[in-house]
Image: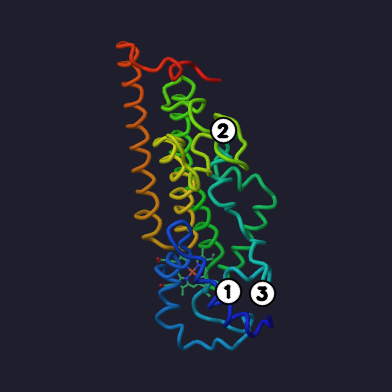
């Protein structure tokens, strides 16, 4: 596609896929300052210009994501940092690495961050751009704390044999899900497959916490959407955090009662390692 058309055509193409609850890119952009300006004034901008000559007053999907070190192209992943929720907010739990350290300790990711700052600098000061994006990482660290706390809660239920049903007493998720417990607690498979108590309610909440809410905090911040960030993502994550704590308490209290009354199926009480 010639670059002249890239500007026009990619405007139509971004919207049908980049929307919805799990990746509300267009909604977050639309309700940001950048998007508000585009939706109010954009109809008067000249869309036949090549991106390099466009010089619009606010950023668009294309001017942000297609830009890399002075040039525009279709390669939109060269600046990608997030790795969705799975790297920052799930894999890193097992490594005990918080998002800001994960990013700051990676040469590759830091060079991607610099490439993003180059985008912002077209309109904002370097300090403003850098501070804003750093604050996004700091918010991610706070979120990571809730996510890793929740995982520790669920893992301790598993270790003590009070998760119900325990994984060995329920069906295995179909291939390609192959990971072993406890790494699989609250795994991604639960968004696509469920059977006979698997995943359990507490794991389901944890899954939507890391895969959806945590990720959306970052996405809201990355799109400068003041509402998307606290209201849609952070508070939803807190609701799940509260539910997870509460469900863990219920499971533990039930286990004590069942043990006392000797009513719990013995196989569910055994420690499973
Ligand atoms: C093409 C120009 C342009 C680019 C590129 C751009 N911005 Fe903006 N930005 C604007 C304009 C215009 C405003 C609105 C300013 C106002 O309301 O006074 C704005 C507003 C903002 C705001 C304030 C939002 C609010 O609710 O007050 C933040 C934060 C922001 N931009 C961050 C960034 C970051 C971070 C980048 C790079 C990833 C970036 N911008 C790239 C033009 C741009």
- The disc placed on residue 63 is 1
Q: Quadrant of residue 96?
A: top right
Disc 1 versus disc 2: nearer the observer: 2
C-alpha separation, residue under disc 3 versus residue under disc 1: 8 Å
Q: Nearer the viewer, residue 228 or 156?
A: 156
Query: What is the quadrant of the N terminus in the image?
Result: bottom right
Tell me the SS state at disc 2: loop
Q: x and y percent of residue 107 in the render?
A: 69, 50
For the residues marked 1 and 2, what is the alpha-carbon distance in whole angstroms? 39 Å
Q: Quadrant of residue 36?
A: bottom left
Residues at marks 3 and 2 touching, judged by CB atoms closer than 8 Å = no
Structural distance between the alpha carbons of marks 3 and 2? 40 Å
Instruction: Provide the residue designation for mark 3.
Output: 72
**The C terminus - image quarter:** top right
Disc 1 element: helix
Note whether ligand 1 is within 8 Å of mark 1.
yes
Measured as percent of width and height from the top left, residue 71 is found at 69, 74
Q: Residue at x 52, y 20 (%)?
A: 272
Q: Is residue 149 above or below residue 101?
A: above
Quick check: 86 above or below 273?
A: below
Task: Classify 95 as above or below 255.
Answer: below
Residue sitting at x 58%, y 74%? 63
Of circles 3 and 2, the one toward us is 2
Circle on res. 183: 2
Q: Is residue 234 left or right of residue 261?
A: right
Do tag 1 and tag 2 residues touch (Cβ < 8 Å)?
A: no
Residue 256 is situated, as x and y percent measured from the top left of the image, at 33, 16
Circle 1 Cα neighbour tier, 10 Å, few/some/many (<14 / 14–19 / ≥20): some
Q: Nearer the viewer, residue 123 or 232?
A: 232
- Dot 3, crowdedness within 10 Å: few (<14), some or many (≥20)? some
In the visual, does 243 lie left or right of 111? left
Q: Earlier in the sequence, mark 1 or mark 2?
A: 1
């Amino acid at each position: 596609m010639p670059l002249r058309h890239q500007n026009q055509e990619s405007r139509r193409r971004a919207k049908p896929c980049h929307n919805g609850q799990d990746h509300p890119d267009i909604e977050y952009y639309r309700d940001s300052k950048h998007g508000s300006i585009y939706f109010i004034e954009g109809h008067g901008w000249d869309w036949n210009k090549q991106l390099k000559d466009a010089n619009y007053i606010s950023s668009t999907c294309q001017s942000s994501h297609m830009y890399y070190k002075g040039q525009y192209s279709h390669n939109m992943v060269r600046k990608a940092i997030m790795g969705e929720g799975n790297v920052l907010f799930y894999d890193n739990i097992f490594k005990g690495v918080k998002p800001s350290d994960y990013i700051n300790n990676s040469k590759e990711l830091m060079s991607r961050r610099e490439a993003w700052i180059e985008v912002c600098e077209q309109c904002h000061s370097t300090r403003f751009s850098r501070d804003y994006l750093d604050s996004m990482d700091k918010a991610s660290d706070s979120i990571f704390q809730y996510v890793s706390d929740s995982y520790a809660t669920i893992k301790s239920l598993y270790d003590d044999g009070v998760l119900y049903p325990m994984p060995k007493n329920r069906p295995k998720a179909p291939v390609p899900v192959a990971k072993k417990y406890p790494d699989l607690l609250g795994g991604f498979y639960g968004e696509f497959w469920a059977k006979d108590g698997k995943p359990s309610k507490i794991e389901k909440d944890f899954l939507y916490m890391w895969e959806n809410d945590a990720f959306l905090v970052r996405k809201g911040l990355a799109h400068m959407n003041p509402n998307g960030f606290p209201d849609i993502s952070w508070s939803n994550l807190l609701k799940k955090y509260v539910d997870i704590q509460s469900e863990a308490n219920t499971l533990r209290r039930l286990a004590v009662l069942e043990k006392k009354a000797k009513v719990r199926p013995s196989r569910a009480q055994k420690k499973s390692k």
